Image (spheres, rainbow, N blue to C red):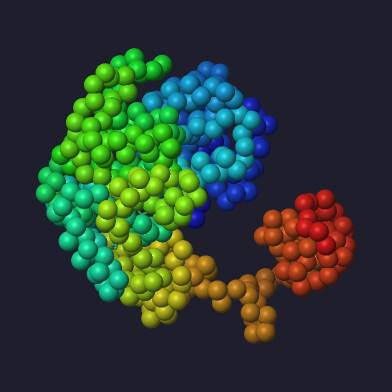
Amino acid sequence: MNGRILLVEDDDSLREILAFNLEDAGFSVDTAENGRQALEKFDPTRHETVITDLRMPEMNGMELLSELLERDPAAVVVVVTAYGNTERALEAMRRGAFHYVEKPVNNLALQTVINKAVDYRRSRRENTALKQRVQRGERPALIASSPAMNEVLRLVDKVAPSDATILIQGESGTGKELIARAIHERSERADARFVAINCAAIPSELLESILFGHEKGAFTGAHSASEGKFAAAHGGTLFLDEIAEMSAKLQSKLLRVLQEGEIEVIGANQPVSVDVRVLAATHQNLKERVDRGEFRQDLFFRLNVIPLRIPPLRERREDIPVLFRFFLRHHAEGEGIEVDRAVDDALLKYDWPGNVRELQNIVERMILLRDGARLTLADVPDILRPDAGFDVDSGALPFQLPEGGLDLMALEKTIILAALAKMDGNQSATARYLNIPRHVLLYRLEKYEVDDDEPDAPK
Ligand SMILES: Nc1ncnc2c1ncn2[C@@H]1O[C@H](COP(=O)(O)OP(=O)(O)OP(=O)(O)O)[C@@H](O)[C@H]1O
C-alpha cells in the first residue's frame, strides 16, 4: 500500500514529470502550483507526505513548511532544493522538514525518500496511538501466543532489569520497537523517558546534532543551543532504530559514549556524562555488514552484549489469529464484527512479508471497506488470495456482462494495455503473460495505434 502525496511545484513541466513518476511508482498524487494552493489542498488525514520546492514565488517552501507544521505538527514534508544547496536543505530539516532531495531530481532517490517518509508518517501515527494509550495508563499490548514469542518475552523479562545494551534483530514490522518499550517498562528506568530515534530517516550531518545536541553558533543555522536525544533520555532508555544505517563517524562517536558514558555536545569544550541505557535495532544482518567492513566490529560486539531475535510472523503462525482478533477489536471498537472461517484460513496461509505491521494495516483496510457486519472471503484483499484471479477453466467471467452489448475490440485493447502496464511496458513479458506470440502483440498494438517503442527485453 503506497501513500497519498501532495506535490507542490511552481514549474509546470517539472510538476507534471514528478507527478507522473510518483504515480507510476504507485503513489496517489495531488498537485499544487504554489504555497497558497497547497495550504488549501492539504488534508492531514489524507496526505501522508508533502513534497515542496523551496524556491517558489509568493510563499517560498520554507514559509509553507512552517505553515504546514503549524496546522499539523506531525506533517511529514520533503523539500526539493537546488543542486549543491545542502546548507539550505539542512536548515529546512532543522525547522522540521523530514528530508530533502536535490535537483535535478533522481527518480529512484525521490522514491526512496518518499517511501521512507510514508513509513515514518505511519510509524509516527502508531507511536502517537501508543503514547495516548500509555498516558491513559494502559500498557501497550504485546500479543504473544506462539512458543517463539513467549520465548522472546521470557528473555525480555530476564534482561530488562540489567543495564546491558541489547541488539534487537528482526524483519521490518516484527515488533522491535514494541519489544524495546517492553524492556524499558520492565526495567528500573521505567519512570524515566523512553526516547526512540530512527537512524535511517535522518541524514548523518543532522543525526549527529540530534543525538548529541549542539551549542548556540556551533554551525551555520545553529541559532540556539539544542539538547540532544542522549541528554533527553538521561536516566532512561535511548532506542536507536535502524542502527546499521549509521555513518562510520557516528559509529565511532557512539562507541565512545558506550565506553565512557560521556557525550560530546557539538561546539562544547567539555564532555558531559550521561546515564542512558542504549537499545539498538536493525532489520539487516549486522554480522554480515561487519564482515563486509560496513559496520564497526567493536561497536557490534558492544551492542550485541545480549542479542534478541524477533522471528518473522510466518515463523510463528499461531500469533496470526490472535493478533487479527486484537486489531479487529481495536479498530472496530465495540462493533462486534463476525468473521468467516475462510478469512482466518486465508490469513494463516499468507506469508506476511511486512509482518505484524502489514497485518495491522490489512485489518484496518478490511474494516473500512467491508460490506456488512460479517467479514467474508470477499473482504480479504487479493494479495492474500493467490487463487482470487480469473480462472479460465471454470468458464466464469471475472466481471458481469453489461446488458446493452459489449465492444469486444475495445475490451481487447483495454486488456492488452492493462497487461502492458502490469509488465512495466516490457513487450516480451506482456506477450508471455497474454500467452500470445510477440509479433501478434506488436500487430495488435499497431492496430490500436499504440506506440510500440517502449523499452523491451532482448528477444
Ligand atoms: N506482538 C505484537 N502485539 C501487538 N502489536 C504488535 C506486535 N508486534 C508488532 N505490533 C504492532 O505492529 C506495528 C509495528 O511494530 P514495530 O514498529 O514495533 O515494528 P519494528 O520491527 O520496530 O518495525 P521497523 O523495523 O519497520 O521499525 C506497531 O503498530 C506495533 O504496535
Give residue 409's position: percent from left, percent from top. 80, 66
The quadrant of the picture showing ligand 1 is bottom left
Give residue 406's position: percent from left, percent from top. 74, 69
Give residue 133's position: percent from left, percent from top. 21, 51
Give above or below for 447 relative to 392: above
Give above or below for 264 relative to 385: above
Q: Please give the name of the residue rendered at 20% of the width and 40% of the height, measured from the top-left corner.
A: 276
Question: In which quadrant of the rendered view does residue 277 lie?
Answer: top left
Question: Is 142 left or right of 347, judged from the image as shown?
Answer: left
Please name whichever residue, 177 or 79, is drawn nearer the observer in this view of the structure.
177
Can see residue 217? yes
Give residue 458's position: percent from left, percent from top. 81, 59
Q: How many marks?
A: 0
Question: In which quadrant of the rendered view does residue 340 lie?
Answer: bottom left
Please name whichever residue, 53 or 329, is drawn nearer the observer in this view of the structure.
53
Give above or below for 163 relative to 319: above
Q: Please give the name of the residue rendered at 33% of the width and 62% of the height, measured from the top-left corner.
A: 310
Please name whichever residue, 43 or 285, is drawn nearer the observer in this view of the structure.
285
Q: Please give the name of the residue rendered at 15% of the width and 39% of the height, measured from the top-left corner.
A: 235
Give above or below for 199 relative to 150: above
Question: Is 59 left or right of 176, judged from the image as shown?
Answer: right
Can see residue 68? no
Please name whichever residue, 280 or 112, is drawn nearer the observer in this view of the structure.
280
Instruction: Give the position of the C terminus as an image quadrant.
Output: bottom right
Q: Please give the name of the residue rendered at 57% of the width and 40% of the height, measured from the top-left corner.
A: 109
